[in-house]
Amino acid sequence: MHEYEHKLPHHDATEGFDDTEPEAAPIWAFTVGSVLVLVLVIWSLQQYFEKVWNDAVYENVLAPTSQQLEGVRNRDEWALTHYQYQEPTKKQVRIPIDRAEELFLQESAAGKTFYPAKPTVPKKEEPDTPAPGAAATGAAAPGATPAAPATKK
């Protein structure tokens, strides 16, 4: 058996157990305090993460404009404000957008708007259900296959 430096006290078995109730107020105070500290730490970490994330997004994505993007924007701006031939045969000319708007408004006021299609009369819509008395005139029932038209020979 091992020997200890200090003598271990042995209790008398007749003493029994401590049957007094523990103090509830300090236990509840510790529990509530621990929960509040935990919530505060989680909220603080969330706020810190969001700040760091938003700063990183701003610095890397929103703040700088790349040279390539600047070049595209400059090219588009130039194309919208200058005349230019579209192809080597010089049959098509690009005009500035302001001039194109002026010409379109003039043509529209004169009634010369151009639509690249033949003018057609819209078809009248036919009702889905037959008119009353259609059965008496020999019209087909709804859902029936129409008869094929007679062909001339």
Image (spheres, rainbow, N blue to C red):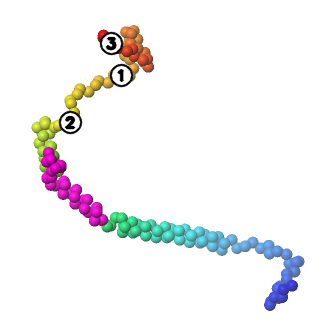
Q: Amino acid at mark 2?
A: Pro
| Residue occupying the point 60% across, 71% down | 34
Numbered tag placed on residue 127 in the rendering: 1
Q: Secondary structure at mark 3?
A: loop
Element carrying mark 2: loop
Question: Could you tell me residue 28's position as x and y percent?
Answer: 64, 70
Classify residue 10 as left or right of residue 94.
right
Residue 32 appears anywhere in the view? yes
The three-letter amino acid code for the residue at tag 3 is: Thr
Please tell me whether mark 2 or mark 1 is closer to you in this view.
Answer: 2
Residue 109 belongs to the span the image colors magenta: no
The numbered mark, 1 or 3, whose residue comes first in the sequence reads 1
Residue stretch in magenta: 65-91
- CA distance for labels 3 and 2: 35 Å
**Residue, disc 2:** 116
Q: Which image quadrant: the N terminus?
A: bottom right
- Measuring from the top left, give residue 88's x and y in whole percent: 16, 50
Image position, residue 18 (x, y; %): 80, 75
**Foreground residue, 60 or 24?**
60
Q: Which residue is mark 3?
A: 151
How crowded is the residue under tag 3: few (<14 C-alpha within 10 Å), some, or many (20+)?
few
Q: Is residue 98 visible?
A: no
Residue type at mark 1 is: Pro
Q: Residue at x 23, y 26 (%)?
A: 121
Name the quarter where the C terminus is drawn: top left
Q: Earlier in the sequence, mark 3 or mark 2?
A: 2
Specify whether 114 is left or right of 31.
left
